[in-house]
Image (cartoon, rainbow, N blue to C red):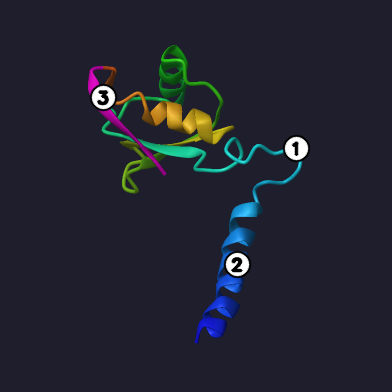
Amino acid sequence: DDDEYRGAAPADEEEKGDKLSAPKQPGSSGSSSQGPRSVVVSKMHWWTSDADLENFLEEKGVRGVTKIQFQEEKSNGKSKGIATVEFNSPIAAAEAVALGDVELQGAKILISLN
C-alpha cells in the first residue's frame, strides 16, 4: 500500500507543478501577467460616459485603461450604469478595486474584479 501511495504522489505533485510552473517562463515575473485585467463598475448614473469614467480613474491614480464597454438598455440604448473596464495589467485592475467606496458624479459606485 505504501508503494502505491508513493507511486501516485509524484504524479499528483507533477500535475500541480505543471499548472504552477506554466506562468514562470523566462522573462516573465508571473504575477504581473496573471490575474484578471478587467473590472465591473456599477451603480453609476446613466449619463456617465466612458471619458468620464476613464478621467475619474486617472484622477485616482489608476492608469492603463484599454477598453470601456457600458451595458445598455435594449429598448432605448440608455446606459444601465454598469461598465466593464479592461486594463493593460492585472495590477491596474487591482488598483481600481482597491479604491473602495468612491463617488463618481455624486453616485457611490462599486468596483469589482470581472
- Left or right: where 34 falls relative to 41: right
Magenta segment: 106-114
How many residues crowd mark 2 within 10 Å: few (<14), some (14–19), many (20+)? few
Can residue 67 be seen?
no
Which residue in the protein does label 2 denote?
15
Q: Earlier in the sequence, mark 1 or mark 2?
A: 2
Q: Earlier in the sequence, mark 1 or mark 3?
A: 1
Which residue in the protein does label 3 denote?
101
Which residue in the protein does label 1 denote?
27
Magenta span has 110? Answer: yes
Q: Position of residue 44 (x, y in %)?
A: 29, 29
**Disc 1 from disc 3: Cα separation:** 36 Å
- Please give the name of the residue rendered at 44% of the width and 32% of the height, measured from the top-left corner: 94
Q: Which mark is residue 81?
A: none
- Please give the name of the residue rendered at 52% of the width and 21% of the height, measured from the top-left corner: 63
Where residue 80 sits, quadrant-wise, is: top left
In the image, what residue type sits under mark 2?
Glu
Q: Secondary structure at mark 1?
A: loop
**Mark 2 against mark 3, which lies toward the viewer?**
2
**Disc 1 from disc 2: Cα separation:** 23 Å
Where residue 4 sits, quadrant-wise, is: bottom right
Magenta span has 104? Answer: no
Q: Residue furthest front?
A: 2
- Please give the name of the residue rendered at 36% of the width and 42% of the height, measured from the top-left corner: 72
